[in-house]
Image (cartoon, rainbow, N blue to C red):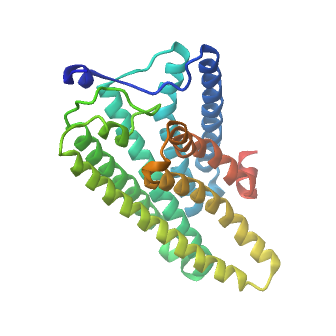
Amino acid sequence: MSNSISSRHYLLLALADMRQLQLLHFCLLLGISLAALLGNGLIISAVACGHHLHTPMFFFLLNLALSDLGSICTTVPKAMNNSLWNTRNISCTGCAAQVFFFLFFIGADLALLTIMCYDRYVSICKPLHYGTLLGSRACAHMAAAAWASAFLNALMHTANTFSLPLCQGNALGQFFCEIPQILKLSCSKFHLRELGLLAVSGCLGLGCFVLIVSSYVQIFRTVLRIPYEQGQHKAFSTCLPHLAVVSLFISTVMFAYLKPPSMSSLSLDLALSTLFSVVPPALNPLIYSLRNQEFKTAVW
């Protein structure tokens, strides 16, 4: 296809070819979206209205819920529309917006999960300094830094990716617009610049992962020294849900983008992208609410 056609629209990957399967995918995506909207909406409402939940942990959880809502609303509605109406088209402007907001909310997710890990570390390992290190102003600054860094990262990648000329058609091998899929359509040597930016972002993500792992090593060492079983149970009940969310999110993202090309396949790429873009926003509220009595009381 010519560059003029490619620049006007893209073709997203169809989740299925049979009409019955397309409608089934629509129903599944609708169910996941409603679960994510309900769960994250409950978190936002409970934290905003429950004054006893105005603590650093729940403040960051509220920010994570906002990020999860934005993430699933970026990719899923277009996929639902395509499945329902049997279409694949997305405009160039819509694709750019999807790339920007997806990177923005995913980047904010990773930054907020790292900050929440720091919150757990200070709470368990340095409880006497908790009020000093995590005061209201410090929490606001950390949340603002997470959102601002995610915004700048998304803006940088989006502007660079959509400035590249395309000469390999306009069909993407994913159900939403994703930078690696768009780079496959580029014939310009400048795509190496975007690969460099992706490498920088990958290093930042790896840095967050290292901080999370090292923090949890210190947390578990401290918890295992607690002499009372009840104290250990309380510490684990607040840390394990966060660790489960972090493990699911980071492991799927890293495997999706760092796996060798020989392991790449259409079905595997689709499954991995679903795991880190669709499942966590619906699963996070469930994980956090099931093991937190304060939150369940506030919801009721």
Residue pushed farthest right? 229
Residue at point 42%, 60% (across, down): 205
State the image coordinates of residue 242 (x, y, percent, origin top left): 62, 60
Residue at 59% across, 77% down? 217
Q: Quadrant of the N terminus?
A: top left
Can residue 242 be spotted in the picture?
Answer: yes
Query: Residue extending furthest front?
Result: 262
Residue 33 lies in quadrant: top right
- Return the residue nearer the eye: 290 or 56: 290
**Count the marks: how many?**
0
Is any part of residue 135 visible from this angle?
A: no
Q: Quadrant of residue 161?
A: top left
Image coordinates of residue 188 in percent, x first then y, are 18, 40
Query: Relative to 231, is 24 above or below?
Result: above
As drawn, is 98 to the left or to the right of 20? left
In the foreground, 88 or 258: 258
Q: Quadrant of the C terminus?
A: top right
In front of the other: 243 or 193: 193
Q: Determine the residue positioned at 52% across, 57% down.
A: 250
Q: Is residue 35 left or right of residue 108?
A: right
From what the image shows, is residue 212 above or below residue 28? Answer: below
Residue 153 position within the rendered picture, expressed as x and y whole percent measured from the top left? 32, 51
Q: Where does the image place residue 34, in percent across and percent down from the top left?
A: 63, 31
Query: Would residue 230 appear left or right of 207 to someone viewing this image?
Result: right
